[in-house]
């Protein structure tokens, strides 16, 4: 029952991943095929492409994607590769009427159709309808986007299992992106996601910023689907620093006890994680950049009603400050950890079954997928 923190039984332990899982280039290469091309990969929030023509790009384990919303409001995931001579089409994010290749000006509509191919009308038998952008299956659930890069993951709802039900108390589908931050971190992508999903490091890495806000978490949820989730009660809101609690925003509309008294941390395997608190949602995507670095996208979201509350801009700034401050404390610890993992003396250690529950669940999932 959420709200109970007394441990009546000894906490079980499990073995962590071998350090080679975080450092070996051959393993990183295998992850491309066995994880990323065999999964529904979370891509953050759907409202990052809110309007027709809005696009963002993602580079994921050898694949480059354009996420774009067409003129009818449908989101798509296309390969970021021109069908003519293979040029990359776009970088970053923005809005466009056509996706235009910078090399030879082949141009594509936001629904992927080839709209302009200069001089190709002179080529005998050329059929523009057969040269649209390569498209990947894309699904939206609770305001999150998920892409299937290899076709081996099965239906998205089978992959996610009871994902919707576990998160039903929070109005996640309504949450609105307020701020995004892009960065590169000198650690393996799995280690970055590990640290977001465990309580063990709070006292060591965040002793004066957020540690005192968190009670011991509840037992991990027994979920159906390719994710891990764990709820824990907080003193105040976990989305603000300890000394900024006076700037707390109202709770999300409809969020009831006990859920409004804490935060749920969820890891959507393989590479997206998020925290649903009483007043905010913050999301991280972490994509491999070789074994020794990862590209990270941080997103901070609020409910539309919250965004109309008095003094919202100043208070929201404090939420962004907390997200950045905690991350800026995590990054040096992660980089230092990665140096240790590369040592010939590093070994797989025991994981705490409560404080590192989601890390443990991911480790067993990873081993199954990589077998």
Image: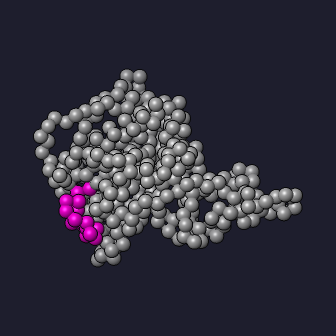
Q: Tell me if residue 98 comes above or below residue 102 in the rendering.
A: below
Q: How is the image coloured?
A: one colour
Query: Residue 221 location in percent, x, y?
Result: 27, 47
Percent across and percent down for residue 69 are: 56, 66
* Residue at left offset 44%, top offset 29%: 20
Residue 329 x/y as whole percent: 33, 47
Q: Which residue is drawn at 55% across and 66% down?
A: 74
**In the image, residue 266 above or below residue 278:** above
> Magenta residues?
241-263
Which residue does the image show at 41% across and 51% down from the upper left?
Answer: 160
Observer-nearest of 213 and 217: 217
Magenta segment includes 262 = yes
Classify 340 as above or below 90.
Answer: above
Q: Identify the residue at image location x=41%, y=33%.
A: 367
**Res 190 quadrant in image:** top left
Res. 18 image quadrant: top left
For residue 332, say whether it is visible.
Answer: no
Q: Going by the image, does 27 lie left or right of 178?
A: right
Residue 35 is covered by the magenta coloring: no
Q: Is residue 345 left or right of residue 253?
A: right
Report the residue that reaches farthest toward the top: 345
Q: Which of 188 and 26 is in front in this view?
A: 26
């Amino acid at each position: 029952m959420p709200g109970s923190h007394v441990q009546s039984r000894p906490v079980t332990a499990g073995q962590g991943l071998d350090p080679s899982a975080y450092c070996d280039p051959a393993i990183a290469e295998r992850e491309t095929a066995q994880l990323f091309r065999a999964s529904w990969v979370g891509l953050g929030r759907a409202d990052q492409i809110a309007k027709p023509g809005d696009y963002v790009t993602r580079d994921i384990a050898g694949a480059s994607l354009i996420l774009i919303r067409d003129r009818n409001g449908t989101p798509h995931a296309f390969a970021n590769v021109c069908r003519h001579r293979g040029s990359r089409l776009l970088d970053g994010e923005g809005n466009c009427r056509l996706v235009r290749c910078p090399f030879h000006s082949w141009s594509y509509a936001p629904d992927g159709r080839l709209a302009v191919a200069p001089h190709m009308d002179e080529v005998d038998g050329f059929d523009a309808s057969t040269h649209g952008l390569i498209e990947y299956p894309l699904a939206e659930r609770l305001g999150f986007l998920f892409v299937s890069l290899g076709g081996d993951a099965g239906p998205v709802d089978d992959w996610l299992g009871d994902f919707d039900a576990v998160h039903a108390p929070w109005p996640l589908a309504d949450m609105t992106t307020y701020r995004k931050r892009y960065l590169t971190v000198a650690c393996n992508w799995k280690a970055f996601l590990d640290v977001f999903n465990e309580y063990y490091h709070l006292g060591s890495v965040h002793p004066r910023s957020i540690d005192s806000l968190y009670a011991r978490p509840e037992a991990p949820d027994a979920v159906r689907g390719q994710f891990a989730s764990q709820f824990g009660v907080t003193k105040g809101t976990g989305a603000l620093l300890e000394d900024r609690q006076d700037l707390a925003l109202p709770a999300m509309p409809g969020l009831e006890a006990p859920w409004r008294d804490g935060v749920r941390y969820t890891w959507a395997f393989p590479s997206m994680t998020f925290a649903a608190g009483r007043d905010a949602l913050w999301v991280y995507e972490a994509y491999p950049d070789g074994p020794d670095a990862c590209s990270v996208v941080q997103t901070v979201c609020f409910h539309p009603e919250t965004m109309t509350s008095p003094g919202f801009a100043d208070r929201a700034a404090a939420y962004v400050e907390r997200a950045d401050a905690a991350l800026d404390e995590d990054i040096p610890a992660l980089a230092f950890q990665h140096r240790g993992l590369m040592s010939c003396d590093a070994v797989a250690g025991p994981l705490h079954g409560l404080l590192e529950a989601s890390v443990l669940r991911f480790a067993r999932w990873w081993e199954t997928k990589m077998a």
